[in-house]
Image (tube, rainbow, N blue to C red):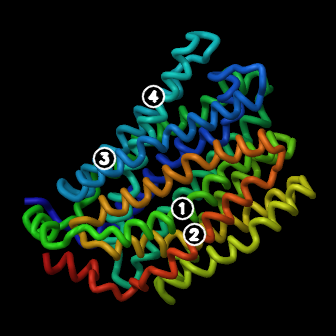
Amino acid sequence: MRKLSSRPDKAIVLGVVVCNGLEFFDFVVYAFFAQTIGKVFFPAADPNMALLLSVGVFGVGFIARPVGSLLIGRYADRAGRRPALLLSAILMTLGTAGVVLTPGYATIGVCAPLLITLFRLVQGFALGGETGPSTAFLLEGAPEHRRASYVALQMGSQGIASALAGALGLALALSLSPAQMLDWGWRVPFAVGTVLIPIALVLRFKMPETLAPPAAVQASSRALPWRSRPVLLGILVIAGGTVSTYIGSYMSTYGTAVLHLPPADGLQAAITIGLTTLAGALIGGHLADRYGRWPLMFWPRLLTAVICIPAFDWLVTHPDAQTLLVMSATLAFLTAVTAGAVLTTICELFPAARRASALALIYSVGVSLFGGTVQFLVTWLIAVTGNPMAPAWCIAATSCAAVLATLLLPETRNSPHNVQQELTRL
């Protein structure tokens, strides 16, 4: 008989959140060092082509995310949240260790980019299966009046991970020569992630199970058919946030490769984005619990659609560190403040028997289709057109789509699928 807990200790919740942040850390570090990785694994006469190939492999990691979401998400809805989260963390550790240990193109030739692509697929598979089970665990373990606040810790942990990745990258950029950075310095953040994830993994071994016993879950699953409407709307809402998020993680590369700012300025932007994301997530989760999910999903995303183009225009015409920091922080805050409401709403639209797999599917498809392609698309558009405003148009378009999708979603704060009542009943 599976042991069921409706209220995990705060230390256990922290362990889940920390491990989620570390997995995201390993994934976004690649984006921060895309330019350097391009030189190591994709040597080309044209620097733009090396960068394009590098961000293309960044996108490859997203191809495996829907597969990971389906397999690990279904596993979480059948076997429980705990074993699924352990599996995703172990796979992320293996993928990141592979990135650390793979020699460059100069050493093993074409095998180098092939191996990097393979390990990015493993990372993508693991991260695809992480979001659904971990978010379901936070929702099911939260007090009824604080569900969005708990779920918002997901985005908060990603903010901390981004800030730590940027801080570590900044420290390396200031202490190492360009030759040292190219030779081995870029591997250091991946090595740190490889060491830290197993430590957080120990905390996951101690977590309780929040999914109801198998018999009750299977009965609920048979009684409640899949609904395509919330899945499609959820993907569009996720797309608005994910494009803003991954363009945010691209800003360090954008600052150096497009605006020709010093590498330290680009990494300072990453730190600022991370800290602003943490603050926005915590504030947004609290407000979503107090005033409802829908206002926090709608108004910040609408404001993002309105201001992103003039914000990027200001950055392009005033390309300095201060402008980069202010613009990046503003867009990051507006994205993060919606995160708790968005993830909580999607969870509350589905019963426990489908919650982890539904969220994993919606999140990974939205992220894979839009987040996985946006950096490649932006890099390609800038290279072809010479127009540095490409990121702004991508954010504006997907934000408008997310606003329209939000108009069709209900308010779920008082959802009939009350999580605590559901756990008690089952």
**Do residues under tags 3 and 1 come within 8 Å of each other at their CB atoms?**
no
Q: Nearer the viewer, residue 7 or 105?
A: 105
Which amino acid lies under the numbered mark 1 shown in the image of this protein?
A: Ala
Q: Whole-percent x and y of residue 315?
A: 85, 58
Of callouts 3 and 4, the N-terminal one = 3
Q: Which residue is under mark 3?
A: 86
Of callouts 3 and 1, the N-terminal one = 3
Of callouts 2 and 1, the N-terminal one = 1
> Is 308 above or below relative to 246?
below
Mark 1: give few (<14), some (14-19) or many (20+) Cα within 10 Å.
many
Is 404 placed left or right of 357 in the picture? right
Which of the labelled discs sits on residue 239, or is there none? 1
State the SS at label 1. Answer: helix
Label 4 or label 2, whichever lies nearer to me, is 2
Mark 4: give few (<14), some (14-19) or many (20+) Cα within 10 Å.
some
Mark 2: give few (<14), some (14-19) or many (20+) Cα within 10 Å.
some
Which of the labelled discs sits on residue 291, or is there none? none
**How far apart in space, not on screen, are marks 3 and 1 (Cα)?**
27 Å
Q: Which residue is under mark 2?
A: 401
**Do residues under tags 2 and 1 come within 8 Å of each other at their CB atoms?**
yes
**How far apart in space, not on screen, are marks 4 and 2 (Cα)?**
33 Å
Which amino acid lies under the numbered mark 2 shown in the image of this protein?
A: Ala
Of callouts 4 and 1, the N-terminal one = 4
Q: Nearer the viewer, residue 223 or 139?
A: 223
